[in-house]
Amino acid sequence: MISFIIPIYNAEKYLSACITSLVCQTEKDLQIILVDDGSTDRSLAIAQEWAAKDARLEVYHQPNAGQSAARNRGLKHAKGEYVAFVDADDAISQDWCEKHIAAIKGVDYVQSGYTRNGVQKTPSSVHQFTSPCMRLYRREAIAQLRFPEGMIYEDVLWSVDLWLSGATCRIIRYDGYHYTANPESTTAHSHPEAQKRVLQALRAKRKGASMRGKFIIAYTICRLKLHFIRS
């Protein structure tokens, strides 16, 4: 079984399309965990309406605490052998589960690509994308990992922790994750203080890291700085 974790905050424009892409998967053995993070629009009501129609959906609500807290809440409820993250304003192709399950034998997680505005982005390196989405994980491989709460760009730190853990990965040439450029999302705007904070946290991780770990962190810092300059 795959446990999907979907953090939700004011996503009423996109949520039904996201959920539709999950319930219509060719793989049917799913647990779909919807965590509403204090939405002020109809997101919670939409999630509850879907859950009333499909027993695979579970809805949890909490006061607004951020995307990390919502993902961590979802991890507590995950029961599947595998775990995947999808953002509430994104969607996945109908064969996403099928493709990733076929590829995960012998590794801890599978990394694939995505489309954005019709443009395909296929990874050539395990460390190319820092989002926890676009991957299928063995739940046991991420059991000790949690997203740092109370900050932006937390998924970068989570991904670095995943790489430093020594988790094994397979890259597949598949772009079935459909990213939506949501102008209202947190990372759609520049946050200089948050950028400074995540870079400081990455530098702190270098202390005591192996040579491989230091290389991974240095590479991530360089890519982040380029991303911040362009954003």
Image: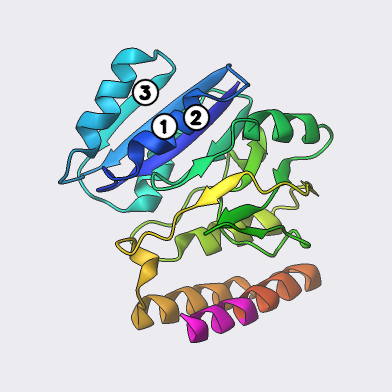
Q: Who's the residue at 54% across and 78% down the image? A: 227
Residue 36 falls left or right of residue 63: right
Q: Amino acid at mark 1?
A: Ile
Q: Nearer the viewer, mark 1 or mark 3?
A: 1
Q: Position of residue 208 (x, y in %)?
A: 68, 71
Residue 70 falls left or right of residue 81: left
Q: Which is nearer the eye, 70 or 171?
A: 171
Q: Who's the residue at 59% across and 61% down the image? A: 130
Name the quarter where the N terminus is drawn. top right
The mark found on residue 58 in the picture is 3
Q: Which residues are magenta?
A: 222-231
Q: Position of residue 199 (x, y in %)?
A: 51, 78
In this view, the residue farthest toward the left is: 40
Mark 1, residue position? 19
Position of residue 35 relative to residue 154, above or below, is: above
Q: Tell me whether the residue at label 2 lies in contact with that at label 1, contact meaning CB atoms closer than 8 angstroms.
A: yes
Label 2 to label 1: alpha-carbon separation? 5 Å
Q: Secondary structure at mark 2?
A: helix
Q: Amino acid at mark 2?
A: Leu
Mark 2, residue position? 22
Residue 52 falls left or right of residue 148: left
Q: Who's the residue at 37% across and 33% down the image? A: 34
Q: Earlier in the sequence, mark 1 or mark 3?
A: 1
Residue 151 visible in rendering = no
